[in-house]
Amino acid sequence: MDVTANPLLWIGQGAAVNALEWSRVAVSGVDTRDRTDNLIETTKQTVVDPYAMFRNLYQQARRAQAETRRDDRRATIPAWFPQGSANSSGR
């Protein structure tokens, strides 16, 4: 959720805000599971080997994630950091 769209970040801090934030995370997880449950059940009933299919999908997603991170060419040290500015100027 975007920082500006999350009302809990505007309230402050404390036990009540932490409890609300964890409740939001839990409800979000249950909602995601509910939205994907029908697709998962349909897949289990129609595919010959659902385990192999889900394993394959997981491996594809992990490979894509690894490629995205490997291809990320952003600098790891910000230019404003003293070490970063020394490296970028060639000193």
Image (cartoon, rainbow, N blue to C red):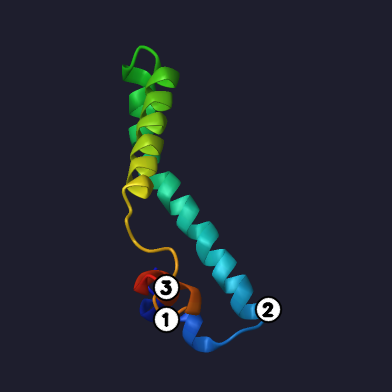
| Contact? badges 1 and 2 (CB < 8 Å) | no
Residue nearest the observer in this picture, 28 or 82: 82
Q: Residue at x 46, y 58 (%)?
A: 28
On residue 26, the disc is none
- Identity, as a three-letter code, of the amino acid under mark 3: Arg
Query: Could you tell me which secondary element the residue under label 3 belongs to?
Result: loop
On residue 15, the disc is 2
The x and y percentages for residue 54 are 40, 26
Select label 2 or label 3 by which is in front: 3
Q: CA distance from mark 3 to mark 1?
A: 15 Å
Farthest residue to the right: give it.
15
On residue 91, the disc is 3
- Identity, as a three-letter code, of the amino acid under mark 1: Trp
Q: Which residue lies under the disc numbered 1? A: 80
Q: 35 above or below 61? A: below
Residue nearest the observer in this picture, 83 or 25: 83
The x and y percentages for residue 63 are 37, 35
Badge 1 or badge 2: first in the primary sequence? 2
Image-based side of 47 in relation to 52, left or right: left
Q: Residue at x 41, y 50 (%)?
A: 32
Query: Could you tell me which secondary element the residue under label 1 belongs to?
Result: loop
Q: 65 above or below 53? A: below
Location of the N terminus (image quadrant): bottom left
The x and y percentages for residue 18 are 62, 74
Badge 2 or badge 3: first in the primary sequence? 2
Badge 3 or badge 1: first in the primary sequence? 1
Q: CA distance from mark 2 to mark 3?
A: 49 Å
Q: CA distance from mark 1 to mark 2?
A: 36 Å
Select label 3 or label 1 by which is in front: 3
Select label 1 or label 2 by which is in front: 1
Q: 35 above or below 89? A: above
